Amino acid sequence: MKRILSLFAALLLCGSALAQSYVPSPENLRERAAFQQHRLGIFLHWGIYATYAQGEWYLETAGLRQEDYAVAAQSFCPARFDAAAWARAFRDAGAGYVTITSRHHDGFSLFKSAASSYNIVDATPFGRDIVAELARACADEGLRFQAYYSLLDWIREDYPQGRTGLKTGRKGDRQDYGHYFDFMKAQVKELITQYPNLSALWFDGLWDHDQDPDFDWRMPEFYAYIHRLKPELLIGNNHHQLPSDGEDFQMFERDLPGENKAGYSGQGIGTLPLEMCQTMNSAWGYRIDDPWYKSVRELVHLLVRAAAKNANLLLNIGPMANGELPAPALDRLAGLGRWMRGHSVSVDGTTSTAVPEQSWGVTTQNDRTLFLHILTPEALPCRDGLCKLVVALPRDLRPSRKDAVALLTSGAKLSYELSRDGFLTVTLPKSAIEDIDTVICLSLNGF
């Protein structure tokens, strides 16, 4: 019996090793590090649904039949689309990468695809490959380029129907996941081979079969196929779970890691690079009735709080059907750019710290500097024009010389006291407090 139990234990260990078989390549690890160097990314939800101006789920929410919805493709002609202008706006905002919906749940592809004629080149009067143009523009501006890809499809007959897309008129008599899986492999190969600067794939839709736990998406096989084609390519999946074997970064929808206010991000936090995605207003795709854009201050605070949790912020914009970015989105990008030009060092290339979030704000750090972000200045006690910031610091984050504390934007030195038990008290003029985020720099390791 002991020998049988030992053999069983060995088989379990072997099975576990097989289940966790993905070993990222050195190139992949370098890509992960590069991914974390730029804390701001731009997300673009764009497709023929922009013609309806009712969001990216309009085929589903309006209960349309696929042949009626597809009429939008015949009139989708974004004549004002200028990939170079978009990329410049994203770069000037301080973004480091761009992720665009190459194919959303409605099955329409924004790239030239031999696997499906339902694409921007073959099915619209526009006739141009939007993904190709944006990929080139991003390369020209030094931006990393990534592609969102939907794992589910509301119109293809071979896709096994899940809990969404049930009103589009599919017959449901030709459901064949093996055939659909091969289609996805073909399209993903096109994305990888047609756009050489593609650095990551952002998958979505696994939740469509969450009521069918026995459904096998064959993700390990899919991931292995992708990594064989391009080992350095990063893979993320918006499945609202801990990362699976074969994934390279973990994403959180509409919430920062460890928070779940929107109800999509109750999963734990793994060890992979982190990213949270959020809309600039309310919807992902363009909605004409959605004017509720977050202020520049709100967006900066979201970016800073993401960096403080060692995460990127993937900030979404829904372009209009004519090819333009909405004016409020451009305004917010410009505002972000103004802030980033004086403060990017306090978020880009930084990590989280051992200091928890404070009533007044958060902290980030790099090898040389601890950054104290005052996001809520009203939490500071102020008297006679002077404010006091008090924070407990671990030993490795304490200042090492008298002039080690200064304001980021002006460089003005600030007086401080450090108690024996590590409590730092910084005194700063109330007049030095900025509208959005006052950043105090604390030099580390003698720098």
Image: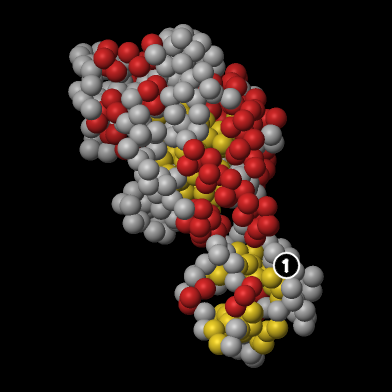
The answer to whether residue 443 is above or below residue 37 is below
- In percent of width and height, residue 54 lies at 32, 31
Q: Could you tell me which residue is drawn at 35 percent across and 29 percent down?
A: 53
**Element under label 1?**
loop
Nearer to me, 166 or 235: 166
Nearer to me, 182 or 337: 337
Q: Could you tell me which residue is drawn at 74 percent across and 76 percent down?
A: 413
Q: Could you tell me which residue is drawn at 33 percent across and 52 percent down?
A: 262
161 relative to 90 in the view: left or right: left
- In percent of width and height, residue 91 lies at 64, 40
Report whether residue 288 is seen. yes
Q: Which residue is mark 1?
A: 410
Tell me the kind of residue under disc 1.
Ser
Q: Quadrant of residue 169?
A: top left
Q: Quadrant of residue 282?
A: top left
Q: Quadrant of residue 343?
A: bottom right
Q: Could you tell me which residue is drawn at 48 percent across and 77 percent down?
A: 379
